[in-house]
Image: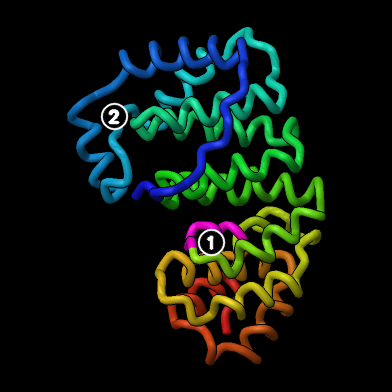
């Protein structure tokens, strides 16, 4: 699953990251379950090795790791994320994603290249979707100039960047740029990959919670251009 050729951004010096990684690797390593790790890796289609820590236990450990530490700045977030991503086991990536979700507002538009690296290195839906909706979406909402990057990502050859562009407005509700969302969906309506077709349906379904009539009208006009999977996803909860 690892994308070869992805350029890793420079890891900034961060004393906070030193502390977090020391605590994290100690806490996670002792909590692993090798037998559980095998089944977790199989469920995630061999995307990465696992330590075998179930989500509730992992999040409890993460709270312990971060207890008493100051809020990070952007350099700290960058260092923690990149150093976690350099570790093979997926739980460390999950820690990085959860940390970035919590502190996305501490990061500027200059953090987008770091996020791109995370999206395209050891990519799978389990990390990509959360980064798309809660980190990339937060960055673009805070700095609309980053919309130009989303316009580039929607036609990128990397399917995970395409999926991110489709999903970055997922939590925006009434702030959603519907014309851009519908335009992105049309740009990729013929994409051969399941994860892109599914993302189109998901993005439309989520926006339908805010404006069901707009989604229904869009699909009434364009339905024939989309795969049945996409249409089924989009129409869940609103009907034909």
Q: Residue drawn at (51%, 38%), measured in percent from left and top? A: 8
Circle 1: element type:
helix
Magenta region includes residue 161: yes
Of residues 220 and 18, the one nearer the viewer is 18
Circle 2: element type:
loop
Of residues 79 and 26, the one nearer the viewer is 79
Alpha-carbon neighbours of circle 2 within 10 Å: few (<14), some, or many (≥20)? Answer: many
Considering only vertical position in the picture, is 229 above or below 69? Answer: below
Examine the image and state in which quarter residue 56 appears: top left
Q: Which residues are magenta?
A: 158-165
Q: Describe residue 186's horizontal placement relative to residue 25 as left or right.
A: right
Q: Describe residue 139's horizontal placement relative to residue 187 as left or right.
A: right
x and y percent of residue 145 in the render? 81, 55
Considering only vertical position in the picture, is 71 above or below 189? Answer: above
Examine the image and state in which quarter residue 239 appears: bottom right
Q: Residue drawn at (57%, 57%), measured in percent from left and top? A: 164
Look at the magenta stretch and give its main secondary structure: helix
Circle 2 residue: 52
Circle 1 residue: 163
x and y percent of residue 24 in the render? 45, 16
Of residues 230 and 74, the one nearer the viewer is 74
Considering only vertical position in the picture, is 224 above or below 232? Answer: below
Alpha-carbon neighbours of circle 1 within 10 Å: few (<14), some, or many (≥20)? Answer: many
Of residues 119 and 10, the one nearer the viewer is 10
Considering only vertical position in the picture, is 175 above or below 200? Answer: above
């Amino acid at each position: 699953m690892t994308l070869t050729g992805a350029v890793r951004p420079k890891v900034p010096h961060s004393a906070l990251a030193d502390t977090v990684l020391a605590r994290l690797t100690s806490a996670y390593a002792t909590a692993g379950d090798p037998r559980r790790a095998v089944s977790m890796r199989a469920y995630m289609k061999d995307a990465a090795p696992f330590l075998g820590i179930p989500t509730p236990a992992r999040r409890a450990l993460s709270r312990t790791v971060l207890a008493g530490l100051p809020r990070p700045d952007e350099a700290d977030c960058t260092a923690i994320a990149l150093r976690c991503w350099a570790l093979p086991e997926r739980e460390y990536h999950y820690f990085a994603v959860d940390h970035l979700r919590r502190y996305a507002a501490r990061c500027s538009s200059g953090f987008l290249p770091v996020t791109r690296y995370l999206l395209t290195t050891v990519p799978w839906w389990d990390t990509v979707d959360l980064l798309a909706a809660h980190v990339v979406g937060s960055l673009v909402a805070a700095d609309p100039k980053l919309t130009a990057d989303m316009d580039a990502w929607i036609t990128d050859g990397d399917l995970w960047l395409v999926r991110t562009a489709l999903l970055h407005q997922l939590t925006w509700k009434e702030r959603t740029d519907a014309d851009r969302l519908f335009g992105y969906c049309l740009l990729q309506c013929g994409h051969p990959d399941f994860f892109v077709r599914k993302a189109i349906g998901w993005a439309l379904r989520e926006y339908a919670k805010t404006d069901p009539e707009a989604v229904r009208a869009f699909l009434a006009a364009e339905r024939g251009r989309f795969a049945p999977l996409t249409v089924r996803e989009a129409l869940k909860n609103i009907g034909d």
